[in-house]
Image (cartoon, rainbow, N blue to C red):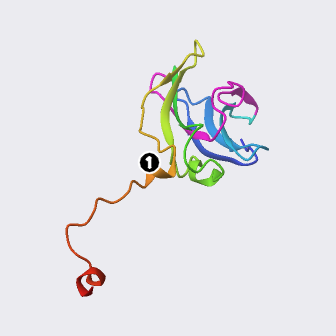
Amino acid sequence: MLQQQGARPRFAPSGDLVAFDRKNEDGYYDVYISALNGRIVRSVTAEAGRFPRNNGNPVFHPSGRFLVFISEESEHFLPRTKYLGDPGMGLFCNLWAIDLDTGRFTKLTNAPIKRSVATAFPPSPPSTRTSAATAVI
């Protein structure tokens, strides 16, 4: 079972499927499920339309019915920096799950994602101490 550009494989509890993420032509990662012979059984996030950025680190629920993965939020203050949302980094991401029987997605976390530089680096509070420069004047 080999997939070009595939990473972070996880076996289904049944042992007959593998979930992994793979970098696509658009430069973003998506989650896939394949048979042990390498044949892609299902594209979990590439065709869903709701996950336009990086998705990965899939893990099967012990029942095998659910697959949990991280998904980079579509809006944050470094949208052109693809590697920060890489599934190996996980910045700007939330956890999602898919019910493999119904195809229904559920957002599991709602981490506060910084959407602008101003919210990522708020201004420092004014200092209560006088600086050396103003003390001299």
Taking the view exactly as shown, the residue that stands out farthest to the top is 102
Quadrant containing the C terminus is bottom left
Name the residue at 47% across, 45% down: 114
Front-lying residue, 1 or 106: 106
Magenta stretch, residue numbers:
39-64
Three-letter code, disc 1? Thr
Quarter holding residue 40: top right
Find residue 55 and report its horizontal and vertical position in percent.
60, 38
Name the residue at 57% across, 53% down: 84
* Predominant secondary structure, magenta span: loop
Taking the view exactly as shown, the residue that stands out farthest to the left is 128
Taking the view exactly as shown, the residue that stands out farthest to the front is 137
Label 1, secondary structure: give it: helix
Quadrant containing the N terminus is top right
Find residue 121 and report its horizontal and vertical position in percent.
42, 55
Front-lying residue, 74 or 12: 74
Find residue 58 and report its horizontal and vertical position in percent.
55, 36
Q: Residues within 10 Å of mark 1 (few under 14, many from 20)?
A: few
Name the residue at 65% across, 27% down: 44
Q: Is residue 59 magenta?
A: yes
Residue that label 1 marks: 119
Q: Is residue 130 magenta?
A: no
Quarter holding residue 28: top right
